[in-house]
Amino acid sequence: MSVANILFNKASITASGAILLGSSVVCDGFEEGRKTAIFTHIHTDHTEAFPTCLGRCDNVYVSKQTYDLLTAMEGEYLSLKNNFHGINYKDSEMPQNEKITLFESSHMLGASQVQVESSDGVKIFYSSDFTSKDSVPTKCDVLVLDSTHGDPRFDSVVDPESVERRFVDMIEDTIKNGKPACIHAHRGRLQYAMHILSRKINPDVSFLSSARDISAARVYDIYGMEIRPLVDYNSYVGKKIANGTYPYLEFRPDLHLTDREEAGMRRFFLMGSPGGGSALIDHGDNSVHLEFDDHANFSSILRYVEKASPEVVIVDNYRTPHGETLAEIITKTLNIPSKGMPQGNSSI
Ligand SMILES: [Zn+2]
Ligand SMILES: [Zn+2]
C-alpha cells in the first residue's frame, strides 16, 4: 500500500457526517464502536449526534466554553453527566490509545480544531469550521478540512471591522427612522452582534431573541462580551414590544420570516450571500447580507492547507456540496493527494 493510502486510512467522513479520526475518535457525529467523541462547536450541523454520544460513548469532550454554552442551552443536568468533559485548549487527553488535543478557532466562542496523535505517531488534524485568522499549530500528516466556502465564488475579501462599522450605521439609521430591525445569524455571530449593539444602541431600545439564544448570551457575558438583558420574543412582554410602536431589535438564529418582516421590517443577514459576491450586499428589498469572515474564503482555505503541509487531505463533502471539487483543486494546485468524503454526497 502506498504511503498516501496508509494515511488516507487514518481518517474518514461517514455517510452521516461523522468525522472519524485515528482508530478511536469520532468528531461531530456518532459511529457505532467509537467510544471517544469530540464536538468542535455548538452549531447544529456539528451537534446533531450529541445526545446519542452522551448516552453511548465512554467520554465526550468539548472545550470549556462549549461545555458552558451547551449546559446553558440544554439544561444544568448536563453537568451531572460524568462522561461529559469541558477541557482547556492545548491540554491533552488520552482516554484510549490516542492523544487528543483541542486548539482554539476564531469561528465562534468555544470553537475548536482537533488534533489526534495515533499510537504509531501519525498526526491527524480536523479543522472544523475556521476563519482566515486560524491556522494549524504544527505540521500534520492527515488534514480533514471543512469546505463551507471552498468554492472560487466565495472569494470576497472580508474586512470584519469595516463591515461591522457599516452594520452598526445601518442599524442606527433604521432605529432613527423609528423602524424595528431583524438580525439573522448563526448562533455565536448573533451573540457577537448583540454585544456590539449593546454598546452602541440607546438603552431604551429593547433587544428580543429566542430563549436559547438568551441563555447563550449569558455565557458570552461571562467570557467578557457584555450583552444587555434581552426579552424572549415568545413571551408576553416580548409580543407586546413587537406589537408596539417603538423601534426594537430582534435577533434570530434562523432565516424564517416573521409577519413583521413581511410587512417591511428591515432584515440583516450576517452571513455570506448564498451566491457569493462582495462582503456587503444591499438587495434593495429591505434585506442586506453582511459577511464577517466566520468561514475562511476560498484563497484563505488554500493558504491554510499550504501552511499545514499535510501528506493527504480529506475534504468534508457532507456539510457542503463542494468537497469533491475543492479536493480536486487542492490536488492540482498544491500537489497534495486529496479526496472529498462522503463521495457523491447529495444530502445538501
Ligand atoms: Zn460552524
Ligand atoms: Zn459547519
Image: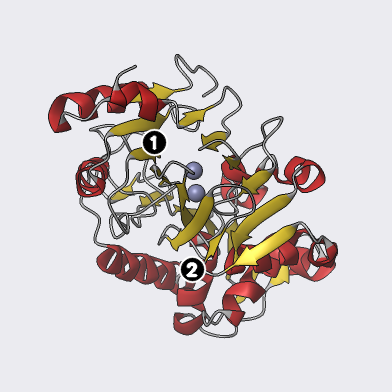
Q: In the image, 105: left or right of 73?
A: left
Q: Nearer the viewer, residue 317 or 80?
A: 80
What secondary structure is found at the residue carrying circle 2? helix
- Residue situated furthest top in the rendering: 344
Residue projecting furthest to the front: 120
**Picture coordinates of residue 267 (x, y %)?**
49, 53
Kindly identify which residue carries mark 2: 192
Q: Quadrant of residue 52 in the image?
A: top right
| Gap between marks 1 and 2 measured at Cα | 21 Å
How many circles with numbers are drawn on the protein?
2
The image's colouring method is secondary structure
Looking at the picture, tell me which residue is in the foreground, 189 or 45. 45
The amino acid type, in three-letter code, at marker 1 is: Pro
Q: Is residue 27 above or below residue 67?
A: above
Quadrant in the picture for the N terminus: top left
| In-front residue for pair 308/175 | 308
Frontmost of labels 1 and 2 is 2
Query: Is the CB of mark 2 within 8 Å of ligand 1?
Result: no
Q: Name the secondary structure under disc 1.
A: loop
The location of residue 266, given as percent across then percent down, is: 48, 55
The answer to whether one can see residue 185 in this image is no
Residue type highlighted by circle 2? Tyr
Vertical relation: 322 (above or below) 56: above
Q: Residues within 10 Å of mark 1 (few under 14, many from 20)?
A: few
**Residue beneath disc 1:** 274
Residue occupying the point 43% across, 41% down: 120
Quarter of image, res 205: bottom right
Can you give x and y, in whole percent of width and height, for residue 9 in the image?
44, 26
Image vertical order of residue 227 relative to residue 99, above or below: below
